[in-house]
Image (cartoon, rainbow, N blue to C red):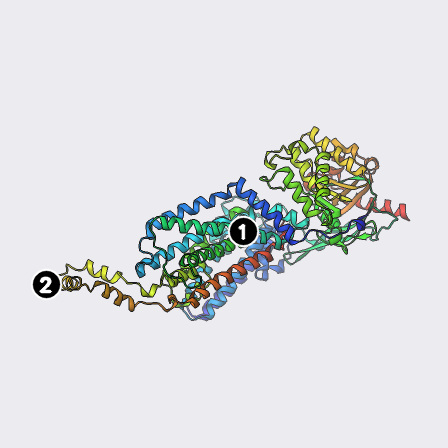
Amino acid sequence: MNITESAIREIVNYVLLSVGYWGIFKKCGVKPYLSLVPFVREYNLSLCADREKDGRRLTIVSLALEALAVIILAQEENSDLVVFLSMFFLALVLTKIIYSTRVYFGLTKVFNRRKSWTWLFVFLELLTLLIWGWHPAFVPSKKVDDPSDLTEAKGLGEDVRGETDGLTVNINSRTVIDFFTKKTLLKDIHMIIPRGHMVLLLGGSGAGKTTFVNAVTGYEKADATINLGKDDVYNDYDKLMYDIGFVPQQDLMRGSDTVLATLSDAATLRLSSSVGLVKRRERIAEVLEQFGLSAVQYSLVDKLSGGQKKRLSIAMEFISDPTLFFLDEPDSGLDGVVARALFEKLRAIANEGKIVVVITHTPDRVIDLFDDVIVLAKDSSRTGRLAYYGPVKDSYEFFGKKSMEEILLSINQKDEGGEGRADEFVEKYVDKVREKVG
Amino acid sequence: MATSKITRRRGHIAQILIYLGKLFRMFLFQSDWKVLPMAAIIAGLVSFAVGSNLYKTMEGTLMGAFALSCVCVWNGFFNSIQVICRERAIVKREHRSGLHISAYVAAHMIYQAVLCLLQAIITIIVSSNLGVRMPEKSLITPSPLLDFGITLFLITYCADMLALLISSFSKTTTAAMTIMPFLLIVELLFSGSFFNLPQEAMPLTNLTATKWGLTAMCAQGDYNSLPMISIWNSAFKMKDIEIEGEKPIFEIMHYIETNNMRDDILLETAHYNQKSEFAHDPSVMYRCWGWLIFWTIVYVAIAVLILEFIDKDKR
């Protein structure tokens, strides 16, 4: 076969494939013209198949494969370099087959068809794409969300200010670029948290709780102004780093260290270099006592119970006496009694004039210990929004519910088993704030 | 509030000391100490199998030096392949709390240097006790054993830092342990002298610690002055070949041996197989050590750079 014939065959194959893609994209709610764009169409097919991550890898592998093919074609035939590169070419082809198979497998799920269709996709791609794209019997069970079609709930759009030595949060937005797509994770979140308050951070999966915490602590900067008293957290991050404690969900400590060594190292890292050895030891003893760890100070971390590990993890952050304290599910894996005791400790910390913000999925058993609640919800554009911030007792009236779990259900999306009323409460809260501040 | 507390935090040195303490505690209380007896066992096995002709013949020296390089690379890889990835989440938390990545890596470098040094000493002791001949001439320091020990240390340390680099970008221990064998094969295949590679692949040999280690060991053992026995051995295997009722190869070999010319012949065959890169010259040694140090620094620098982005890890 000469080059012209081969090229014509390639073009015809590409056009026919595009026709197949076109039909599938149309059925799945993806812009059909994207079926004409190489690489982009593979990615969009993965969206139809609800296999976005595999689609990313498939796109990257396809790009690499094409680039390598161009390099190989530019070389002399049968040269050593061609032989060498062919090895990588083969590896990429195999990788592409695997990711394509995963995407096709996802398509069979979305279209509620037998898994054996995957084989046809792999071996008779063109024909199968055409059948699935244009035969009316092949209908997807769900469509791809088009960001441009999504409407978002209205927002406050203004910063809040107040004479306070507490925490002032004014987040306009927190966006990320994810695989060439801009995503807004958080938007329009404004609040003032006074000192001495213990605040519950409530929100469903993907509502942006951790993103919110990271934005407020300055760990991942947002388009925002965060003030702790008069200090700007973003501008003075290096200075304030130790005045903000963050306790992660997992007990991230080395099991081979003793409790004392763990706390001592944490103190050396977090306390000022001007704090002498004697004072440092005093502080360590004080914190050990406060968190009920004195009796186990020479035990290895691996030997501690779940509750003790959790207390040690909190103590590591508390050693620097932070003003602002965030805890990500500190009660995960703890039974009711131990969890209650832990939250009472946190309440005592807040009573010392600190701000304690806690994420927990079982808030109702300790809700009496909290002053306020922040409710974050995913609106219809899948962006994390503020649905409520205020006293716990008022929140029941605001949402018309009797417990935090019920509130959570009311704001969760319908496809997550919730009532899907996030937009309603976001807008209701905005109206409430506007009414309050004029 | 906050501003009243703002003071200087502890710097890199204090952090290095903290992490050194942690690493040595892990050495003692976790299974990290096992790399030392493992080094002794591996050195013993290799010495037993291929150490008998090291620094006696050209072939034995090449094979022995290659095997010792492999022992060092193996030791280095196993020392650090999991050390960072197994505690990646902890490092991320500590970075958030003010940990300097450079201090963290520096602590690992110091700790691993101690391990590598001990392993180099263990390898020398075990090999000597199993009758492996050590080099008799030095090129850099006054002691031949010290020169040899430094070479073993530098190969181990270079491989160790390469494994540390893999550990710094691997998200899990499984991922790190999957990459390791692949790199081990590259180290063995591209050692340069032991396997015949196409000319185009030769530049790649500069990337491997085995090449520079093997070259340094051969240079120190004065490889080019050693006899070559493979041709003699091949001829010996063919000694009974008869041509027109006679055994010419046997007769020649018999003549050579009865006239005490065997060693001269072995040296003469060696003369035609000398390698300039194995010259018994300090500049060769400096070059090999220089490359090993260079790659060590490169691996460490990349590891630090990669770990600086640890905050970007997906939650």
Q: Quadrant of residue B234?
A: bottom left
Whether labels 2 and 1 belong to a single chain: the reply is yes
Which element is circle 1 on?
helix
Q: Chain of mark 1?
A: B
* Nearer to us in this view, B251 or A372: B251
Q: Is residue A207 visible to us here?
A: no
The residue carrying mark 1 is B167
Q: Is residue A63 visible to us here?
A: yes
Q: Chain of mark 2?
A: B
Marks 2 and 1, the one that precedes in the sequence: 1
The residue carrying mark 2 is B246
**Residue A5 percent across, percent down from the top left:** 45, 68
Seen from this angle, which residue lies furthest front? Answer: B142
Seen from this angle, which residue lies furthest right? Answer: A438
**What amino acid is at disc 1?**
Ser
Q: How far separated are the C-alphas under marks 2 and 1?
A: 65 Å
Which element is circle 2 on?
loop
Q: Is residue B19 above or below residue B139?
A: above
Classed neighbour count for the residue bearing mark 1: other residues with Cα under 10 Å, few (<14), some (14–19), many (≥20): many
* Nearer to us in this view, A350 or B220: B220
**Residue A353 percent across, percent down from the top left:** 82, 40
Specify the label residue B120 is tagged with.
none
Q: Is residue A208 left or right of residue B22?
A: right
Q: Is residue A261 above or below residue B54?
A: above
Q: Is residue A74 above or below residue B86?
A: below
**Residue A300 percent across, percent down from the top left:** 60, 36
* Nearer to us in this view, A98 or B279: B279
Q: Is residue A393 left or right of residue B208?
A: right
